[in-house]
Amino acid sequence: MRIPVMEIFGPTIQGEGMVMGQKTMFVRTAGCDYSCSWCDSKFTWDGTGTSISRQPKEIVEELIQTGGAAFSHVTISGGNPALHKGIGELVELCHQQGWKVAVETQASIWQEWLTEIDDITLSPKPPSSGMKTDYIKLDLFIEKLQSANVSLKVVVFDQDDFTYAERLHLRYPTVPFFLQTGNEDTATTDDTQLVADLLQRYEQLIDYHVQSPIMNDAKVLPQLHTLVWGNKRGV
Ligand SMILES: C[S@@+](CC[C@H](N)C(=O)[O-])C[C@H]1O[C@@H](n2cnc3c(N)ncnc32)[C@H](O)[C@@H]1O
Ligand SMILES: Nc1nc2[nH]cc(C(=O)O)c2c(=O)[nH]1
Ligand code: SF4
Ligand SMILES: [Mg+2]
């Protein structure tokens, strides 16, 4: 079954969440059922990008062509990768190659192949995104992924977002929880200014984090790739 692919890149480092620093290839799929106000990958769903429909086998071939032997981990992101049934076959082929597979999704659409993923990041969206969390669906995700290596990652822009994150962590206290700095300017090419702003936002988020008795077991992280490469695509 074909998968609409926006870009394949790497090897680079996973710049976010539970496996930050892991060397990985990225497969970015097209299309999203959300439209977050601050999405840093809008080109996957706003009509400004182009995707190519590919068979899982062709994706594996391109991963090898691009990354050679210098990787053992593949991250599937988007858009929302969970829109695509064909990813099940891609995951199976990656495992046959001996690669581990990670997925980034907002947990709005379930796919059975999610249970085969090695590192699952669920990233429900806080109020600043303009999106509404379907908790019935999220409960189902957490239940079905009970024995999986799963984490929750919430991007925080303001106090309201932080309160949302606290509630979420209280709802799923046993799921590893990550707070992530929000990037407000996903278009700028002024890296010096961007990094200064991002570090300030990270410091602000640390302030919220350290003062919250609810977040004692949570981890607070920046988006490492934006600190290193700014808003550059394909890194
Ligand atoms: C582009 S999304 C694609 C996967 C999936 N749609 C999701 O949102 O989880 C990958 C990650 O980037 C995060 N993200 C998107 N825009 C961001 C921004 N402006 N600042 C910080 N993180 C952002 C999302 O919250 C998500 O955790
Ligand atoms: N280096 C790097 N790490 C990432 N972690 C999550 C990403 C994403 O866009 O989903 C991403 C990305 O685009 N690049
Ligand atoms: S869910 Fe993810 S890809 Fe979709 S709009 Fe939000 S941040 Fe962007
Ligand atoms: Mg990104």
Image (tube, grey):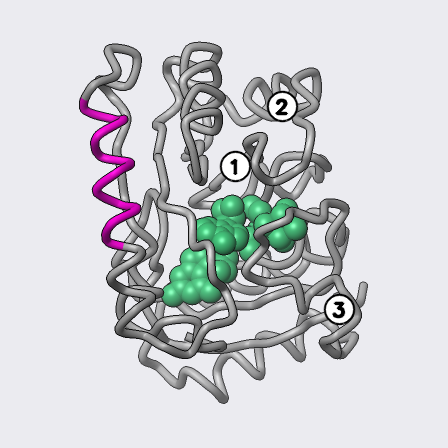
Q: Ligand 3 within 8 A of label 3's CB?
A: no
Q: Residues within 10 Å of mark 3 (few under 14, many from 20)?
A: some
Q: Mark 3 or mark 2: name the one nearer the start of the chain.
A: 3
Give the residue drawn at x 67%, y 79%. 58
Helix, strand or loop for disc 1: strand
Q: Residues within 10 Å of mark 2 (few under 14, many from 20)?
A: some
Q: Which residue is mark 3?
A: 4
Q: Is residue 145 magenta?
A: no
Q: Are marks 1 and 2 in contact (CB under 8 Å)?
A: yes
Looking at the image, residue 90 lies above or below residue 19: below
**x, y percent for residue 108:** 69, 35
Q: Give residue 122's mark.
A: 1
State the image quarter where residue 56 is shown.
bottom right
Helix, strand or loop for disc 3: strand
- Residue 100 appearing in the image: no
State the image quarter where residue 175 is shown.
top left
**Magenta range:** 199-210
Q: Ligand 1 within 8 A of label 2's CB?
A: no
Looking at the image, residue 144 lies above or below residue 19: above
Quarter of the C terminus within the rendering: bottom left
The overriding secondary structure of the stretch rendered in magenta is helix
Give the residue drawn at x 44%, y 40%. 155
Alpha-carbon distance for marks 3 and 2?
Answer: 25 Å
Left or right placement of residue 23 versus residue 68 in this view: left
Left or right placement of residue 184 versus residue 11 in this view: right
- Observer-nearest of 181 and 151: 181
- Observer-nearest of 141 and 113: 141
Alpha-carbon distance for marks 3 and 1?
Answer: 21 Å
**x, y percent for residue 146:** 49, 21
Q: Is residue 209 magenta?
A: yes
Left or right placement of residue 167 versus residue 180 in this view: right
